Amino acid sequence: MTDKNNPRPRRLRFEIFRYNPEDPESKPHIETFEIDERPYMTLYMALSEIRETLDASLQFDFACRSAICGSCGMLVNGRPALGCRTLTADLPEEIRLHPLPAFKLIGDLSVDTGIWFREMAERTEAWIHEQLPFDPDAEEQRMSDDIAAAIYEGDRCIECGCCVASCGVANVNPEFLAGAGLNRIARFMMDPRDGRTDADWFEVVAGDQGVFGCVGMMACADVCPKELPLLDVYAYLRRRTLGTKIASG
Ligand code: SF4
Ligand code: FES
C-alpha cells in the first residue's frame, strides 16, 4: 500500500501468469514486469502501460473500465477482483496476477466466462416462463415495489465470475451453480410473471449442483464486487426448497 507519509512514487513489480493454450510451444510460467506507480492508477491502467511499453503480447480483458461489463475479473494476489476497480494504491508493491480459475483459459489473464454463464443459463432456463399466452390487449400486470426491488437487486449481477472463481465447490464441480447461478435462479423464483412451480424449481435448485451443494465457505459473498446479498439469496432458496420438500412429503 502507498505510504501516505512518503509521497515518492513506488516502483511496482508485477508477477503475471503467462500461457497461450493455442501455442504448443507455450508453457505456463510467471513473467515479471516493473513500472512506476502513478496517482489513482488502477490495474487496468497498469496492465495497459505494461502492454504498451514492455510486452505487446500480454493478454487481458477490459471493456467498460467502470465495473459494469464484468470482463476484467482476475486473481489479484490470490483473490478474485475486477482489474478496472482495483487501485494499485490499495495493494503492496509486489502484485501477483493470475487468470480466474474455473473458466476456460484464452491466454495469460484472459478467460472465457461466457461458456460457463451460457451453460448455466441454458441448464436453469434463465428466462421468464410465461403463464398465459401473450395478449397485446391485456391490462398490464402490476408488481409490488418490494418484489420489483428484490428482482432488481438480483439483476445487478454483472457476470464477472469472481464468485465462481472463489468457490471451492465450483472449482471441483463444473456443474455447481455457484453464487451467480443461484442468484439468477432466485431472481426468477421471485418473479410473479414466471409460471414455474416450487416443484419445478426443486429439480433445479436441490441436489449437489444447487443450493445444498454449497458447503458454506461464503467466499462468493466476500469477493462479489457488486456486493450482492448472496447469503440472503441462499437462505431464500433453502426456505423455498425445503418448503416444497415438506409440502410434497
Ligand atoms: Fe460477479 Fe457478484 Fe455476479 Fe458473482 S454474483 S458474477 S461476483 S457480480
Ligand atoms: Fe468492465 Fe472491469 S472493464 S467490469
Image (tube, rainbow, N blue to C red):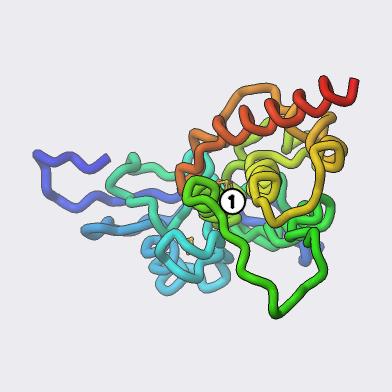
Q: Position of residue 242 (x, y in %)?
A: 76, 24
Q: In the picture, residue 126 is in which quadrant?
A: bottom right
| Residue found at x 22% / y 43% | 2
Q: Position of residue 120 (x, y in %)?
A: 77, 52
Q: Is residue 142 left or right of residue 171?
A: left
- Residue 128 falls in image quadrant: bottom right
Q: Residues within 10 Å of mark 1 (few under 14, many from 20)?
A: some
Q: Residue furthest left?
A: 5
Q: Quadrant of the C terminus?
A: top right
Q: x and y percent of residue 56 in the render?
A: 52, 73
The one nearer the camera, 90 or 121, is 121
The residue shown at (46%, 42%) is 227
Q: Is residue 149 above or below residue 220?
A: below
Helix, strand or loop for disc 1: strand
For residue 145, side relative to residue 39 (left or right): right
Residue 157 seen in render: no
> Residue placed at 83% from the left, 35% from the top?
202
The residue carrying mark 1 is 17
Is 117 in front, or is 122? 122
Query: Can residue 79 be seen by looking at this rendering?
Result: yes
- Of 101 and 93, the residue lying toward us: 101
Query: Which residue occupies 59% across, 51% down?
Result: 17
Amino acid type shown at disc 1: Phe
